[in-house]
Amino acid sequence: MHRRLIAPGALAASLVLAIPASAADFTPGAPGIGDTYYPASGNGGYDVSHYDLRLKYQPRTDLLEGTATILATATQNLSRFNLDFGLGVSEVRVNGKKARFAKEGDQELVVTPAAPLEKGRAVSVVVRYAGKPSELRIGGYTAWHRTPDGGVAAQEPDSAVWWFPSNDHPLDKATYDVSVSVPDGTQAISNGVLQSQSSKLGWTRYNWRSNKPQASYLATLAVGRFDITTDRTANGLPVLNAYSKDLGDNAGAARASIERTTEVAEYLSEVFGPYPFNALGGYVPNVTSGYALETQTRPFYSPRQFANDANVSVVVHELAHQWYGDSVAVKGWKDIWINEGFARYSQWLWSEKEGEGTAQELADYVYETRAADDPFWTVKPGDPGPDNQFHIAVYDRGALAVQALRNEVGDEDFFTILKGWPAKFAHGNASVADFVKYAEKVSGKPLAELFDTWLYQPSKPGAPEAAESRIARSTAGERAKPER
């Protein structure tokens, strides 16, 4: 707000005195939550507890219309606050009253409520909006996948900005109700449990509920024509898998992989402890991307993951994230090793279980097949930087660090750590430093030097360090090569 100065000195002082003293206590919430990699991600001044999204999507035109109701608590005296969002907004209400709003940059929706919000006060925010997510470009790209029969929201570290307003950072988790109306004959897939569906006037509405804290980037939406399978686990959890009807030659391999979701989850529960959420499953839309993503309770898989054959390993990876990455989320995006190093290592454990190469053999293979001058070793998994956040080194060198830990502390303490960590930080956030501290407490050993060697040094650990961590001890004839 710009004010014209009328006079200096005493008159200016009188103007200050004319403002109620309490008004000076209310300040704007920060436009970022404080992430060192992504300063614009998230916002300060409030904490969200629940998102209720009521949506209507037209696959033919890619038009998404929505009303988002956000329940939050003010964490400071707020004069205004930001939401992360990119589509066009027609109205915002705060605690039932119309609020002023303005867009700043690509993704900041600045909301000024009719009356300031006191710290500790419960806040409801209603945002009405519409737009075509595939046409929204932020940083030169869109996280919204158009498909021949619909659209999909699944991307990391950001995807919410393209389809609902949020406090878009893992530090502010919330529960979700996602209600989506689509043309009859089309399905809408989201996180959690399908509470109900109903049809009226040519439209079918699907109501999904995710009842445990969930980071905004882990919220997903897929609209299209799917073949859907359902089941229940031995413990009664609902399992729902969805396959695009036009996967072509990849359809069989996709089903052969994802239909083993329950089996994989049972194995990972033995390693990591009880499954942390209210549903299981996965979905494969007809997208051209090549990655998979750990969207909470219902991972997203690209068809290309199954282009060669069945790929249960990728199912293991994404389900491992339900513990390491979803239930226990990063404090900041620099802590990505907590997610990817352990998800990759879970694939090595699965390989060990299936008799396709032990975790030790796979660690040896990674170490010995990467020359010292390979740029792979310049990436520091413990703090890779935003440009290298999803570099293969975060995954493979990250898993090497996990094997080095296992060798250092022994299997008993190692598997105690793997199971205890998700329990200690369940549905919360943690950092690499938190993990090191926890592993030291459980094992009773100083581990800072080990993690510095494998996570933070921008060079290949030398033979003495590798020998100390018992990496690359096997002979060439005994090494097992990973399949993928």
Image (tube, rainbow, N blue to C red):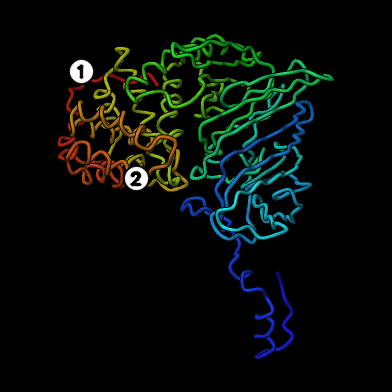
Name the one closer to the observer, 339 or 125: 125
Residue 140, horizontal then vertical, whole percent:
63, 45
Residue pictured at 75% horizontal, 56% vertical: 100
Residue pictured at 74% horizontal, 34% vertical: 64
Q: In which quadrant is the C terminus drawn?
A: top left
Residue pictured at 33% horizontal, 34% vertical: 421
Q: In which quadrant is the N terminus drawn?
A: bottom right
Name the one closer to the observer, 265 or 474: 265
Residue pictured at 55% horizontal, 53% vertical: 120
Residue 425, horizontal then vertical, whole percent:
38, 37
Figure check: 251 above or below 201: above
Figure check: 77 above or below 181: below
Crowd tier of the residue under label 1, counting other residues whose Cα lies within 10 Å: few below 14, some 14–19, many 20 or above: few
Closer to the observer: label 1 or label 2? 2
* Mark linked to residue 378: 2
Asked if residue 206 lies left or right of residue 200, the reply is left
Residue 302, horizontal then vertical, whole percent:
56, 23
Whether residue 309 is visible, yes or no, is no
Name the one closer to the observer, 458 or 269: 269
Q: Mark 1 or 2 closer to N-term?
A: 2
Looking at the rendering, which quadrant does residue 127 occupy?
top right
Crowd tier of the residue under label 2, counting other residues whose Cα lies within 10 Å: few below 14, some 14–19, many 20 or above: some
Looking at the rendering, which quadrant does residue 298 occupy?
top right
Asked if residue 449 lies left or right of residue 297, the reply is left
Which type of secondary structure does the marked residue at label 2 adopt? helix
* Mark linked to residue 64: none
Q: Which residue is mark 1?
A: 477
Whether residue 209 is visible, yes or no, is yes
Kind of residue sitting beneath label 2: Thr
Kind of residue sitting beneath label 1: Gly
- Alpha carbons under labels 1 and 2: distance apart: 29 Å
